[in-house]
Amino acid sequence: MGSRLDQSRRCWTRAQQFIPGGVNSPVRAFKGVAHDGIDVVPPFIASASGAEVRDIDGNSYIDYVGSWGPMILGHANPIISAAISSALERGTSFGAPTEAEVEFAELLTQLVPPLEMVRLVNSGTEATMSALRLARGATGRDYVIKCEGCYHGHADSFLVSAGSGVATFAIPGTPGVPSAVAELTISVPYNDLEAMEHAVAGAGADKVAAIILEPVPGNMGLVLPKEGYLAGLRSLCDKHGIVLIFDEVMSGFRVSLGGASERFGVMPDLVTLGKVIGGGMPVGAFGGKSDLMQQLAPAGPVYQAGTLSGNPLGVAAGIAALTELKRIDPYPALEELAIRWQGGMQQAADDNSVDFQASSLGSMVGFFFSAKAVENYADAKAADSARFAAFFHEMLSRGIYLAPSAFEAGFLSTSHTMQHVDRTIAAAQESFAALA
Ligand code: KE4
């Protein structure tokens, strides 16, 4: 199916007049799948329903981006839409406490094991930024250690590049981040406990406020934690009084109902959430042990705030989404479908002698054009991203909408069926053959 993009092309030209790079978030600009440096036109989406999105030229696609994670119950889910519409009739925002926020907070603490208390914010970035400030305020320490390839939103402390050596302090990853801020962040390889121990020792354990990571990274492609890695981090943090933060903005309610902490049985001190918990509305959250959370203003001295935090529409959507997930427990079926997706994609690649590593966990899927398993960011960067880009466009032209970057994950929803997966695998067979 040739996907004509005339209307998208028109919109793309206009968008770039008024919006930097034509998008409100960089990954949407398809720079990660540019053809030999030639920019491509991203489809402008007109509508979405269930597992499919439709662009303004009328092309429809099976969607594996799912708004980068939120749409686990499918696009335009009627239960979530009805909840938003109902809340809308009572007003959009009050800037005052509401009973629904209390209901939502209680529901989150019931579903996510590390949560004793929780505060709502408006994005994953706000969640991780606030969690780090809380960890620093509670410990009186300044350093934070993160893992290369893990993305925690765009707060200054996280937009850093690894320093030259394992335990050296990070350097700004983008203009605008002061070196003085970047130097308080240390970046180490994911899945390497020894490197983490070395970094803690190098900084001085009594100077490290927090270790933050995606327990199941989806921002370097999908990478799975090695046996014992998460538990090892827990022990290391216990030993030195370091706050362990699981950034589950993406993995939360994706790898299981209770997220990675439930799935792997390792409890962080703080967990950050977003995406799924807003049901498509802008909602983030961070929370954890009460003694930590009680340090937040106005209960304690660590300041954190937000005009639209706990917004009635977002809370209504979130309660509807999480209540529905609790009611139907879609995770066994999602996992089975994801495993089928992984196996079919791997088989299609193997049939065409393509170096390819497909993976899945819960409702998340991923793949690398690589001959070896990918265990960290260095492995991910060594994979063939040019081949990924070519594959992406072959699949898009066949009506399959994958994440437009080799360093992202894919997402299934309760609307995806075996037929969707079979169509995807058939398109992959044709795409791999076309790339040969
Ligand atoms: P937001 O501020 O974009 O809501 O969340 C930031 C964030 C924090 N932590 C993790 C683990 C995340 O994956 C994210 C955001 N994920 C990206 C996708 N890789 C969002 C897509 C985008 O940036 O447009």
Image: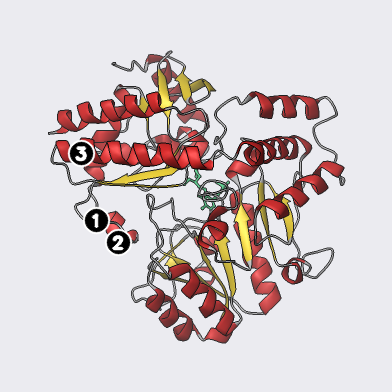
- If you read the primary sequence from the N terminus, does the residue marked by circle 1 or circle 3 appear first? 3
Q: Could you give the CA–CA distance between mark 1 and mark 3, rounded to whole angstroms?
A: 18 Å
Q: In front: 166, or 74?
A: 74
| Residue at position x 34%, y 73% in the image | 164
* Mark 3: few/some/many CA within 10 Å (<14, 14-19, 20+): many
Numbered tag placed on residue 316 in the rendering: none
Report the side of 2 relative to 162 (left or right).
left
Q: Where does label 1 land, which residue?
A: 382
Q: Secondary structure at mark 2?
A: helix
Which image quarter: residue 400? top left
Which amino acid, mark 3?
Ala
Which image quarter: residue 229? bottom left
Residue 37 image offset from top left, x and y in percent: 25, 38
Q: Where does label 2 land, which residue?
A: 378
Q: Where does label 3 land, which residue?
A: 349
Q: Secondary structure at mark 3?
A: helix
Residue 21 image offset from top left, x and y in percent: 44, 36
Q: Quadrant of the N terminus?
A: top left
